[in-house]
């Protein structure tokens, strides 16, 4: 893996908690907000038009329809939805370059400037780590193997003076946590057979047979659960949360396991 990768938007895979593959980061953000507010939604809702044709609406909720405006075609589709949604509310969310072309300003999202909720995201070559793990429940991964992973972190909370968290401060905190993961062996705690002052003995009977290994404690990291990339995301959140400023209310962690695959976990911070 390159030490300084250039990642295009098309390289990302935006997947919500329902397993839907979203087209853009904006759509994923809308899905996360709806989930955070406990509002159920249907992604990719097929709406029948009066002329017999149909369009795919980005989100359908009990309270109305939401269309994400990312290009000129979306504006055309939005107008069709408006004309055909006789009894449903329709809201547009999107890039100002396109959303501003919609004349029905009452359909756009408005917000009070104070207090103001915002988010920042940080991705940096220093947020990468090398590690080894074993997944005894997955045949292909039930042997000792390793990965190089990169991390992106999103912070959400109340802004003050148009600032959520200083990027320099956030970067320092994230790097401290990611460093804890670097060059570690991750394994579910339940496979710990015994330990002494300096070593863990890991043992399990998996798809490839009996596995028995002794590892130094200072190079091992025991997890509550399997050593999946999803669990690593959750573990990073657990370590990050106590270090973040009080105005940060939620944190999301993306971990890429190599190229074009990985995990995204978002969690509300309760203090």
Image (cartoon, grey):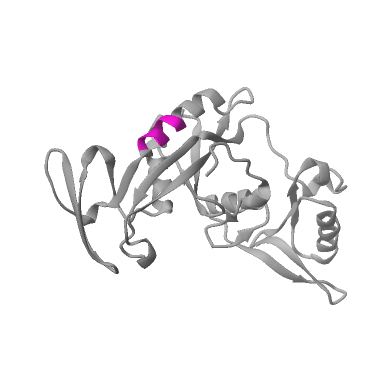
- Magenta residues, as a range? 174-180
**Residue 175, located in which quarter of the rendered image?**
top left
Outermost residue, front side? 2
Residue 48: image location, x then y, percent: 78, 73
Tell whether 47 sits left or right of 233.
right
Tell whether 57 sits left or right of 233.
right
Residue at 77% x, 46% y: name it: 108
Residue at 35% x, 48% y: name it: 132
> Magenta segment, principal secondary structure?
helix
Residue 4: image location, x then y, percent: 57, 36
- Residue 239 or 38: which is nearer the viewer? 239
Residue 26 in sight = no
Residue at 12% x, 38% y: name it: 197
Residue 168 in sight = yes
Residue 67: image location, x then y, percent: 74, 56
Residue 103: image location, x then y, percent: 88, 47
Q: Is residue 14 magenta?
A: no
Image quadrant holding the C terminus, namely top left
**Residue 75, located in which quarter of the rendered image?**
bottom right
Residue at 67% x, 30% y: name it: 113
- Residue 118 or 9: which is nearer the viewer? 9
- Residue 196 or 84: which is nearer the viewer? 196
């Amino acid at each position: 893996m390159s030490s300084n990768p250039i990642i295009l938007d098309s390289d990302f895979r935006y997947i919500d908690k329902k397993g839907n593959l979203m087209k853009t980061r904006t759509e994923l953000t809308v899905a996360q907000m709806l989930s955070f507010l406990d509002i159920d939604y249907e992604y990719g809702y097929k709406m029948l038009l009066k002329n017999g044709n149909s369009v795919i609406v980005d989100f359908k909720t009990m309270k109305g329809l939401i269309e994400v405006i990312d290009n000129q075609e979306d504006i055309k589709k939005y107008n069709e939805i408006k004309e055909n949604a006789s009894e449903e509310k329709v809201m547009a969310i999107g890039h100002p370059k396109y959303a501003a072309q919609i004349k029905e300003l009452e359909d756009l999202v408005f917000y009070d400037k104070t207090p103001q909720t915002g988010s920042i995201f940080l991705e940096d070559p220093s947020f990468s780590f090398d590690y080894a793990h074993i997944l005894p429940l997955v045949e292909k991964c039930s042997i000792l193997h390793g990965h190089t992973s990169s991390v992106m972190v999103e912070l959400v909370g109340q802004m003050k003076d148009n600032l959520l968290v200083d990027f320099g401060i956030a970067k320092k905190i994230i790097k401290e946590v990611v460093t804890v993961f670097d060059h570690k062996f991750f394994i579910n705690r339940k496979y710990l057979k015994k330990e002494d002052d300096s070593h863990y003995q890991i043992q399990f009977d998996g798809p490839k047979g009996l596995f028995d290994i002794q590892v130094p404690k200072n190079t091992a990291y025991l997890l509550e659960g399997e050593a999946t990339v999803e669990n690593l995301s959750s573990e990073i959140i657990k370590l990050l949360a106590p270090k973040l400023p009080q105005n940060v209310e939620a944190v999301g962690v993306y971990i890429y396991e190599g190229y074009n695959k990985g995990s995204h976990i978002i969690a509300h911070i309760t203090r």
